[in-house]
Image (cartoon, helix red, strand yellow):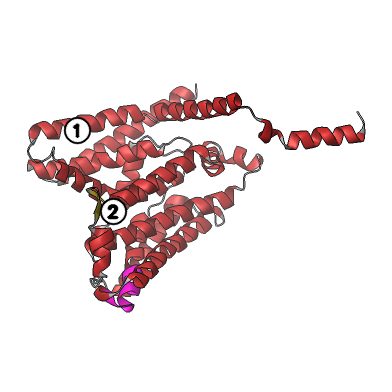
Amino acid sequence: MTTDQQSTVERSDSREPATVTHEQRRGAIGTRVAYSLTALRSANTVWILTALIAIIIMFSLVRPDSFASPANARNIALDAASLLILACGQTFVMITAGIDLSVGSVLIFASVVSAKVMLAMGGSNAGLSAIIAGFIVAVAGGLVWGLVNGAIISFGKVPPLIATLGTLGMALGCAQLLTNGVDVREVPTVLNDTLGNGTVAGIPWIVIVAAVVVTIAGLVLSYTRFGRYTFAIGSNIEASRRSGIDVRAHLLKVYALTGALGGLAGFLNVARFATTTIAGHTTDNLNAIAGVVIGGTSPFGGVGTIVGTVIGVFIPAVLQNGFVVSGVQPFWQTVAVGVVLIVAVYFDIKRRARTSK
């Protein structure tokens, strides 16, 4: 083969994606769908969905008049919305075999700095410019804490448990220093009336925002290079490094994403309650982690789906609501979630033992 012929072949190879047939594209899509279905089955998603449906049926039979109503379903969705956003970021982190204990404190910090900015720009009478500024500050504040976590873990080689436990206290302490422990209550009225309590076709805006975040997170995790790298690092970090993945940079991005989502959740929290509710999120990190693990994401990394996380988050949300509606002390919700969490991890350990044989 002459040099000209060889260069022609190379140019032809470089244009290969343009000559892919319709059948090949359809086959590639089918392969991705099959892979996604396999991932759902491996993450015990079907089992978790069955458990959620059983819980809903149980409470519907006990209190059909109050639990099984559109208004109550709306309340459950609202209660789960912010937690869903936190759990999406936590899913990426846990798939890399990490953990982020600081998300609840990051939510509080983001809500505080956002409310402070909007207060300085007019408080309850502030307009759209203040709301936009509050949104940007909230997401940026969460992003900064995520970058801090990522840098400590990926470059400082500090275990994720210790690193995020430290930033948990730091973010919460900074929020309390900014407010002296007192909630900021002068939030723009228009923000509370629209995003906080407004609806579209009966669906709250906050639920719509959470659904959009969940959808994007699911697509990113399943169909992008970022998602593939996340699974690869969680499955075998050394093999990922040797295959050319910049592990430190990717972990930095994953924790930054989680922090930014925590900032978004903080802004939605301010919009809904028209206050920072500093003392109301002490267990958000544990609830997010529990929802992710219950949803089938392995705490050892390499396995997980956003669909499973959604189902896992709704289990404690439905339990809490069902206990309140049924007149049972809501503290039983914590007990029930703890039991389900332990069972979920137990089954994950058994699954890993079977696949390693």
Q: Which residue is mark 2?
A: 205
Visible residue check, residue 110: yes
Q: Which residue corresponds to the image point at 48% horizontal and 25% vertical from the top-left?
A: 34
Q: CA distance from mark 2 to mark 1?
A: 26 Å
Q: How many marks?
A: 2
Q: Point out residue 150 in the picture as x, y percentages from the top left corner.
A: 50, 55
Q: Point out residue 209 in the picture as x, y percentages from the top left corner.
A: 34, 51
- Mark 2, mark 1: which one is toward the viewer? 2
Q: Point out residue 172 in the picture as x, y percentages from the top left corner.
A: 34, 64
Query: Which kind of residue does numbered mark 2 sit on?
Result: Trp
Q: Which residue corresponds to the image point at 37% horizontal and 58% vertical from the top-left?
A: 264
Q: Point out residue 33 in the picture as x, y percentages from the top left corner.
A: 47, 28
Residue 233 as seen in the image, left or right of residue 42: right
Counting residues from the start of the chain, the first of labels 2 and 1 encountered is 1
Viewer-side residue, 219 vs 153: 219
Viewer-side residue, 180 vs 12: 12
Viewer-side residue, 351 vs 205: 205
Up-down relation of residue 47 to residue 117 (above or below): above
Q: Residues within 10 Å of mark 1 (few under 14, many from 20)?
A: some
Viewer-side residue, 200 vs 47: 200
Visible residue check, residue 279: no
Q: Which residue corresponds to the image point at 12% horizontal and 40% vertical from the top-left?
A: 67
Query: Which kind of residue does numbered mark 1 sit on?
Result: Ile
The label on residue 55 is 1
Q: Is residue 119 magenta?
A: yes
Up-down relation of residue 148 to residue 180 (above or below): above
Q: Which residues are magenta?
A: 114-123
For the N terminus, the quadrant is top right
